[in-house]
């Protein structure tokens, strides 16, 4: 299918930077149009470009718009969310302290948002219960100091990355839905009209979180709940505004019931002291459970750390470009390829440029081409755009290190080419392709070959390769950093070959966050921490992928598509339905079921969301090697 052309055409025909800057301008101008009062946005001019001309409040990274921070500008009118939807890089939106009114705008269509700050406006009305169901990446949600009514939307309970949630100073009614996210570090529901018992999962927050809500009871408030708090208030909370009259009657009934309840409660309290004791015991049991969770809860790396990470990022970025430009002064013409590994003979840039080439694809790190040289050697050329973290000396050293690696399950690159703005990395072309392709690509053809012994061989090979990398790059935060099925190639006899490893120190952090799978581990998404255990998480995902034959949704940046293998496997295991997870295409090898389930257990022990409770690499390998029939 793909056209075969000389590689140099493919490499130099297309400019490196996409010309997206202009396409970013129109949506912002449309947004400005939708405001009725936008005096503060005088720098947003049609004849300039948002990032290079530094439009007020527009946050850019690498020429693409990532944030819109329009705080305290007396803006009003509409917010054209359709225009914002045309900014694919947009992750953070702040309209704090402006004068917007009306129902909450359609931000729910911006699925990649990480932070939505609308505090200090006059937004009103109910927020639909499913409003947040597609905003699965949301970490910060500030809706405080508005006029929102109705109940807390149920969909916030499913935001598994949520760190900050602010609803204070609104007119919210009804019960607090059960929020169980362990990621939650800041919660403020104060000064609303919430009622009923505070869910036990939220009793770890202090009472300021809940103050100013007359109808709330239970821990951490000093007000104990009566049975009525549970029963009679539930129907009221689901009543709509039209039901106000009925509510008045219900209020009367509720008062009467409340009176009886208090009498009953006092009776219980005095007559049956053990009951209240038992209740206390329940609380203290809960308290202990909380303590057991503490390793997760107490890794305090809240938002301040995140912003620190970003700012060092910017500074290292600046440093890079400065160093880069001095480098550039010394540069004269195009330097040649540097061979780092002569296992497949030597070749130079001219050989490569003349080679017949085709595009293999575009990934998070750049584009890949296959090039077949005159001598018949077929190679993959990866063109890396964001490998700018090291200067030339450091980069050369790193490449030479890669070139010396020899392991049966490691693909050692052959050559590289350094230019300030991009790097080429050349490796042997492996005809069978990646595990990703074999598992999910052309199912009809290849799947029959993937029987259990083959899959077990692949898992063992991956584990051995990881063991080697963890010894070799033991000093790295995360030795592989990007283990996933697209980075596992397969030799003719299904021996896995790991590639694209140990890139973390080479890539700018912001890019690494997007492109390297280790950054999708729970400890990074929640606490911005990476460790060798992050590789173990990736190993766990790939084991579950191989066992189930399903594409893990974890590989997608937005978590959409594929199957959340972590949730699926944990649920199946808790309900003793492990066998349902196993790929039905392996059903013929039912006599190996025991072994498959053993591997499933190992996979599950690798994906524990708390790295402390996750296996370490050595133990994971030991168990994989020891899997018995
Ligand atoms: C918004 O306004 C309030 C009240 O004037 C102020 O306390 C708060 O700091 C402002 N928030 C931001 C982010 O500017
Ligand atoms: C979420 O996305 C699905 C599929 O794109 C869509 O049908 C649904 O309406 C969306 N829900 C919300 C609340 O945006
Ligand atoms: C409150 O009611 C719900 C559902 O009716 C029930 O599951 C829950 O156990 C009750 N809680 C208390 C504290 O009685």
Image (cartoon, rainbow, N blue to C red):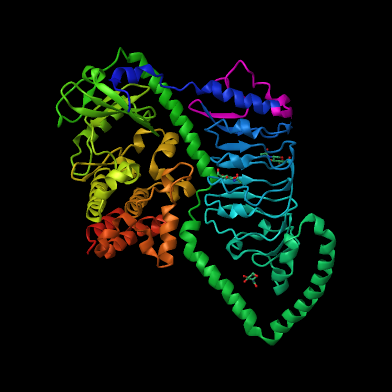
Return the x and y of residue 41 as percentages of the image width and height: 68, 24
Q: Is residue 366 visible?
A: yes
Residue 623 among those drawn in magenta: no
Left-right relation of 622 to 43: left
Which portion, as a residue range, is magenta?
34-63
Q: Is residue 543 above or below residue 571?
A: above
Q: Is residue 321 above or below residue 521?
A: above
- Ligand 3 resides in the quarter of the picture at bottom right
Return the x and y of residue 178 as percentages of the image width and height: 60, 61
Return the x and y of residue 218 as percentages of the image width and height: 67, 67
Q: Nearer the viewer, residue 332 or 354?
A: 354
Left-right relation of 81 to 492: right
Give the quarter of the image for residue 279: bottom right
Q: Is residue 182 above or below residue 77?
A: below
* Quadrant where the image shows the N terminus: top left
Give the quarter of the image for residue 492: top left
Q: Please name the residue shown 43% across and 67% down the image.
A: 575
Q: Spot the residue most to the front.
A: 444
Residue 59 among those drawn in magenta: yes
Give the quarter of the image for residue 84: top right
Q: Spot the residue most to the top.
A: 332
SS majority, magenta: loop
Q: Is residue 479 visible?
A: no
Q: Please name the residue shown 60% across and 23% down the image.
A: 26
Q: Nearer the viewer, residue 542 or 594?
A: 594
* Quadrant where the image shows the C terminus: bottom left
Q: Please name the residue shown 67% across and 49% down the image.
A: 128
Return the x and y of residue 170 as percentages of the image width and height: 73, 50
Q: Nearer the viewer, residue 212 or 376?
A: 376
């Amino acid at each position: 299918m793909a056209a075969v052309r000389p590689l140099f055409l493919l490499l130099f025909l297309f400019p490196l930077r996409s010309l997206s800057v202009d396409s970013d301008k129109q949506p912002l101008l449309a947004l400005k149009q939708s405001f009725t009062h936008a005096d503060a946005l005088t720098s947003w001019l049609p004849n300039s470009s948002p990032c290079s001309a530094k439009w007020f409040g527009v946050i850019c990274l690498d020429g693409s718009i990532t944030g819109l921070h329009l705080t305290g500008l007396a803006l009003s009118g509409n917010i054209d969310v359709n225009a914002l939807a045309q900014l694919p890089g947009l992750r953070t939106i702040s309209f704090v302290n402006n004068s917007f009114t009306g129902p909450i705008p359609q931000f729910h269509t911006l699925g990649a948002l990480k932070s939505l700050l609308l505090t200090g406006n006059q937004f009103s009305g109910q927020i639909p219960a499913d409003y947040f169901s597609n905003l699965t990446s949301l970490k910060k949600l500030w809706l405080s100091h508005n006029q929102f009514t109705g109940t807390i939307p149920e969909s916030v309970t499913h935001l598994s990355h949520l760190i900050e949630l602010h609803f204070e100073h609104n007119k919210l009614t009804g019960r607090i839905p059960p929020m169980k996210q362990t990621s939650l570090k800041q919660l403020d529901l104060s000064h609303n009209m919430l009622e009923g018992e505070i869910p036990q999962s939220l009793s770890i927050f202090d009472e300021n979180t809940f103050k100013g809500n007359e109808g709330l009871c239970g821990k951490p408030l000093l007000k104990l709940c009566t049975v009525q708090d549970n029963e009679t208030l539930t129907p009221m909370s689901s009543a709509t505004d039209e039901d106000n009259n009925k509510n008045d009657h219900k209020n009367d009934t509720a008062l009467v019931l409340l009176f009886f309840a208090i009498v009953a409660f006092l009776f219980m309290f005095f007559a049956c002291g053990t009951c209240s004791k038992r209740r206390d015991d329940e609380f203290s049991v809960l308290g202990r459970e909380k303590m057991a969770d503490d390793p997760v809860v107490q890794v305090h790396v809240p938002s301040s750390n995140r912003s620190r990470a970003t700012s060092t990022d910017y500074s290292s970025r600046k440093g890079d470009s400065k160093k880069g430009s001095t480098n550039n002064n010394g540069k004269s013409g195009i330097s040649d390829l540097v061979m780092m590994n002569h296992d497949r003979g030597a070749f130079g840039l001219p050989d490569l440029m003349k080679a017949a080439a085709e595009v293999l694809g575009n990934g998070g790190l750049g584009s890949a081409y296959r090039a077949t040289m005159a001598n018949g050697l077929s190679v993959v050329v990866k063109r890396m755009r964001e490998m700018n973290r090291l200067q030339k000396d450091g980069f050369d050293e790193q490449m030479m290190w890669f070139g010396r690696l020899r392991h049966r399950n490691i693909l050692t690159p052959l050559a590289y080419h350094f230019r300030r703005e991009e790097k080429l990395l050349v490796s042997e072309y492996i005809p069978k392709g990646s595990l990703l392709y074999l598992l999910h690509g052309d199912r009809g053809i290849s799947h029959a070959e993937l029987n259990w012994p083959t899959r077990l061989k692949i898992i063992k090979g991956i584990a051995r390769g990881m063991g080697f990398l963890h010894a070799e790059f033991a000093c790295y935060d995360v030795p592989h950093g990007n283990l996933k099925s697209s980075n596992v190639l397969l030799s003719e006899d299904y021996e896995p070959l790991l590639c694209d490893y140990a890139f973390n120190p080479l890539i700018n952090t912001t890019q690494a966050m997007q492109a390297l799978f280790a950054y999708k581990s729970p400890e990074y998404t929640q606490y911005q921490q990476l460790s060798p255990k992050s590789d173990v998480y990736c190993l766990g995902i790939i084991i579950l992928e191989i066992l189930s034959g399903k594409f893990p949704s974890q590989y997608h940046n937005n978590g959409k598509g594929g199957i959340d293998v972590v949730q699926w496997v944990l649920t199946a295991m808790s309900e003793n339905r492990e066998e349902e997870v196993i790929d039905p295409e392996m059903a013929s090898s039912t006599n190996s079921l025991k072994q498959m389930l053993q591997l499933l257990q190992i996979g599950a022990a690798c994906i524990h969301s708390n790295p402390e409770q996750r296996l370490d690499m050595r133990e994971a390998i030991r168990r994989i090697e020891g899997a018995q029939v």
